[in-house]
Image (tube, helix red, strand yellow):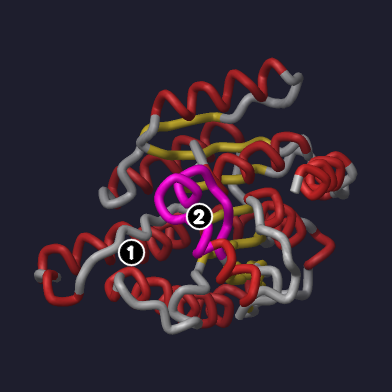
Amino acid sequence: MLMRLKAATEMTERTAIYPSLRDRVVFITGGASGIGAEEVTQFARQGARVAFVDIADEAAASLCASLRAAGHPEPFYQHCDLTDIAALQSTIAAAGARLGPITVLVNNAANDQRHRWEDVTPAYWDERMATNLRHQFFAIQAVAPMMKAAGGGSIVNFGSISWHNNQGGMPAYTTAKAAIEGLSAGMARDLGPDGIRVNTVIPGWIMTQRQIDLWLTPQAEADLMRAQCLKEKVYPADVARMVLWLASDDSRMCTAQLWVVDGGRM
């Protein structure tokens, strides 16, 4: 296991540099921890101008400080509850005013809270949709005019492997994540004439600290290794590298597609 972790670290140090990402303005939701924090870090290392939102102010401040200390451009962080659409669109406008037109949007934020179908109320259902689906559309609505004026852009929406694998125990979450694939496909068609690409990234079971703390038991890990073709755990950096490529000009003719990063599990 130690050799695999060492290999993963070395691979991160050897990742590609995308010249097209230098000075590109990137907006990331849920960027203070987990996959989002890795995306913020990787874009900063590319020389992009990064803005991100979250509600975890302490974690966000620590991330910004670590990137600044490493000599990378310090991201522009704003506190934002994504269920408040007016606040979300206001922070997007503020990021554009401060950094320049946003031409990369990463709709990363979500919360895979478990819940029994018997206990779901209309209010809880609506809250889950607001947390996991609704903000993705309204972030697109806010950035699309900037991208159009700039001559194009890349939008990366985050789906989930969960509903593809018939996972139970969180029906509102899996419904929201299934809908994101439809959102991406429709918006790719609507925004394509303006040079705006829209893709969906589908992560497998990614080893964020939250996932490790809450659900990674020895039995769960053994089951995961049986399910995956590649017998290694998947980490946030593995997903972030896919997002970098989708944001760069290297993927300029890729849109309306699903990009799965799961070690061959789906």
Q: Is residue 120 magenta?
A: no
Q: Residue at x 78, y 74 (%)?
A: 253
Magenta range is: 205-220
Residue nearest the viewer, comparing 160 with 181: 160
Question: Would you place residue 184 above or below residue 105 in this image?
Answer: below
Q: Quadrant of residue 71?
A: top right
Q: Nearer the viewer, mark 1 or mark 2?
A: 2
Q: Residue at x 12, y 70 (%)?
A: 119
Which residue type does callout 2 highlight? Asn
Horizontal and vertical percent position of residue 165: 49, 81
Q: Residue at x 56, y 53 (%)?
A: 146
Question: Would you place residue 146 above or below residue 5 in this image?
Answer: below
Horizontal and vertical percent position of residue 256: 62, 79
Where is mark 2, residue-wise? 108
Alpha-carbon span between mark 1 and mark 2:
12 Å
Residue nearest the viewer, comparing 6 with 240: 6
Mark drawn on residue 134: 1
Which residue type does callout 1 highlight? Arg
Horizontal and vertical percent position of residue 33: 50, 39
Q: Is residue 218 magenta?
A: yes
Residue nearest the viewer, comparing 249 with 222: 222
One can see residue 17 in this view = no
Tell whether 254 sits left or right of 27. Answer: right
- Magenta: predominant secondary structure element? helix
One can see residue 235 in this view = yes
| Mark 1 element type | helix
